[in-house]
Structure formats: structure tokens, C-alpha cells
Image (cartoon, rainbow, N blue to C red):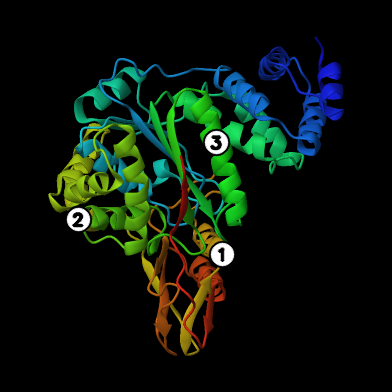
Amino acid sequence: MNMYDIINHKKQGMRLTREEIRFLAEGYTKGEIPDYQMSALLMAICFQGMDEGETLELTLAMRDSGDVLDLSGIEGVTADKHSTGGVGDKVSLVLTPMIASLGIPVAKMSGRGLGHTGGTIDKLESFPGFSTDLPISQFYHNVNTIKMAIMGQTKDLAPADKKLYALRDVTATVDQLSLIASSIMSKKLASGADAIVLDVKTGSGAFMKTEEEAFALAREMVQIGKNAGKKISAVITDMDQPLGRAVGNSLEVKEAILALNGQGPLDLMEVTYALGTELVLAAGKASSPEEAKDLLRQSIQSKSALHKFAEFVEAQGSEKRFVYQPELLPAANIQLQAINTEEGYVSAIQTEEIGRANLALGGGRTTKDSQIDLSVGILLHKKRGDLVRPGEALATVYANGMDAAKEAYGRVVRAYHVQEMRPEETLMVKGIVR
């Protein structure tokens, strides 16, 4: 078996065998297959595609290229959640303690943010002393005792995917559906959870810009999970404006705490309840979506989810008081209001531009090694459909330098579009693939 033949097979539209896929995944991970040959294969896949069986085999081969967590020692149906990325997406901070407070173990591996989208680990590090660098034994212990733990992805988790993604990024082969789905699912399957819910974003701030693309990706990933023996579903959600009102690490943590106190923005809570309902049903804790949603609401009303979050924060190195006194979390020195100049209704917010405003403030990374400022960000006062008048604040920019504040200010103002007529309401949840 050699790489030349595999490239030629796919170039001619032939189906790659399990053995061929295993050969290329293992060989590339070990450095035995050069970048130029793998690049040629990736381009052939972009032109010829992969069928359901090939996509599953590639996913499993990348999963098996490194560590696979064994969660069999954890009692109950273990749950995990993944988002395809967005702006202001702090759902994991709200959802995981809600699920854990219902007795469903959450064993989650998360990543850091890169570019205009935020990362759960960066947000959690707004808590002084908080660490996701957990030994596996501590990770298991925390899930067994308090029903939740979040750790960073280890370098040995799906290393074939890491190498392949880096190559795809520079060879214009990122946007092939089977390659996207297998990349995401290889890491989720390696994380070991029994039940997985996927939050597939669509809109101006999402990777999948159209609903058609988002549904296609959701179906592809759900099929992979089903074929791999997982309880899995995908919720397609709106990212045509930032989720909630806060964008930026510490600001998003504070908004998540507000949500756990029953004061969360409606759009954030709608997405959270939709995803949570899927996990509660998969764990067998409810027999209908209505019952599942009621249990989730009760976790907020009783403050059990809030107390679970405080317990989790303490278990991973910080202190409970930061959850109960979020004003103690990092705060920026400068506040600059972005002022509206015309009367009308907010018709659109260019979400990616808001994300780039946060990036300009230092709240995100331009490279994997960039240091980020946890205290900066943007707080949106007006969302799509809101009436605005001249002189009213659209948003507040939180910064630690005036030059950065002014650049972010310009981006925020340009991101808002105002028109005379109130725009039609759009659904936050576009659909569910099970």
C-alpha cells in the first residue's frame, strides 16, 4: 500500500477502503507521509467527496491516532456538548452546571479561542486560580463527586486531526463537509462521552453562513455519531447577531452568572434550554421535551445550577466567592459608549465585526501563542429589532487602552445597521437533527 495509489484512487472517484484510510492517518501522524502528498489527497477529496462509510472511517482513524478517554468508571450517562463557534457564545458556562445539578455527569474537554470566536477555557480563566490543566485522575474524580469537570484538550487527543487541520488551513481545503465533520467528531469521540449534543451555528458570525450549510453539517456529524454508537443530536442555532449581550471573557462569565441567577437574556436561555433538553432526554432523566425543559428551569429557579457552578469553580482551583460576587472578576479601566446617529430599528448586527472589535481590544488571539486580556470586551445595549434614537448608546466598549478602544468603537458602530421599519423576527433555534 502506498500514498501514490491512494491519491490516484480518490482522484478517479473511487471509494477509499478502511485499510487505506488507516494507512494515511497513521502515516501522516508519524511523519512518514509528506505534506505534498497529503495536500494532493485533500484536494482530491474536495473534488470527489467522501461517502458515509469513508467519513466514518476517517473519523475513527483520527480518533484512534491518540488518546481515547475511557469514561466507563463514571456512573450514569456521561454528557458532552460542542459548539461550532460564535460570538458571545457562553452557553457551556450556563448549560454544564444545569445538567450536572440534575445528576447527569458532564465530562467535557474544551478549547481556547482563536480569531474572532471565544473559547470556554479562556472565559473560565477569568476566575483567579482556575485551572483546566487537570490530571486525568482528578478529572474522573471531579465528575464522579460533583458531576462535572472541564479540562483542556491534551496534545495526544486526535493528533492526526491537528496535523491535518493545520495543513487544510493553508491549502484551501477547509470547507469540505466530510473533512469538517470528521475533524469535529474525531475529538468528540475521543473525549469518550455517551451522549453528545452539537450546537451548529449559522449566520454572519458562524463558520456555516447559510442554514442549508448548517443543516448539511449537522446531518453529517449526527450520522457519524450514530454510526459510532453514540446518543447524539444537533441543534441549529442563530448566529446572525452575538448571543446574549456580553462579548469578551470576563463580561461573558458575568452574564453566565446572571443567567444562573434567572436573569439571562432570552436568546441565550432559548439556546441553552434547547441544547439542555436534548441531553436530559439522552440521559433518560425525562420522557418528553416538556418534562426535560421543566427540570432545566427548576435548576435555575432553585439556584441548584448556580451552586453547582460555584462548586465546580472551587474544585478547579478558584473560590466560590467569585461566583456569588462577580463584581470581583477582572474589569477594564476604560468604558467608551458607541453612540447611535440615526432613528430607526436595528435591522442587523455584523456579528463577525463585533468579534473583531473584541480582538482589537486584546480579548482574543491572532495566533495560538497570543496573550489575551480577560477584562476587555463589548456589552451590547441594542439587539436586532430594538428601536434606537440619535444619541442613544448601541453598546459599551470596555478597554485598557484608548487606541484600542477607538478602533473597537469604530468596528462596533459599523457593525450596526439601522432601518425605518422593524425587521421580521427570526428564530433562534432553526431546527434539530436527531
Front-lying residue, 208 or 166: 208
* Element at label 2: loop
The 10 Å Cα crowd at callout 2, few under 14, some 14 to 19, many 20 or more, is: some
Q: Which label's residue is closer to the chain start, 2 or 1? A: 2
Q: Position of residue 279 (x, y in %)?
A: 34, 38
The residue located at (55%, 74%) in the rendering is 410
Q: Nearer the viewer, mark 2 or mark 1?
A: 2
Find residue 183 and report its image quarter. Answer: top right
Separation of residues labelled 2 and 1 (CA atoms):
30 Å
To which residue does mark 3 refer?
221
Query: Outermost residue toward the left?
Result: 302
* Element at label 3: helix
> In the drawing, what numbered circle is on residue 261?
2
To which residue does mark 1 refer?
353
The residue located at (12%, 49%) in the rendering is 302
Measured along the vertical axis of the image, is residue 254 above or below residue 128? below
Measured along the vertical axis of the image, is residue 146 above or below residue 328? above
Front-lying residue, 345 or 89: 345
Q: Which label's residue is closer to the chain start, 2 or 3? A: 3
* Element at label 1: helix
Amino acid residing under circle 1: Glu
Amino acid residing under circle 3: Met
**Direction from residue 261 to residue 162 in the image, left or right:** right
Front-lying residue, 282 or 100: 282
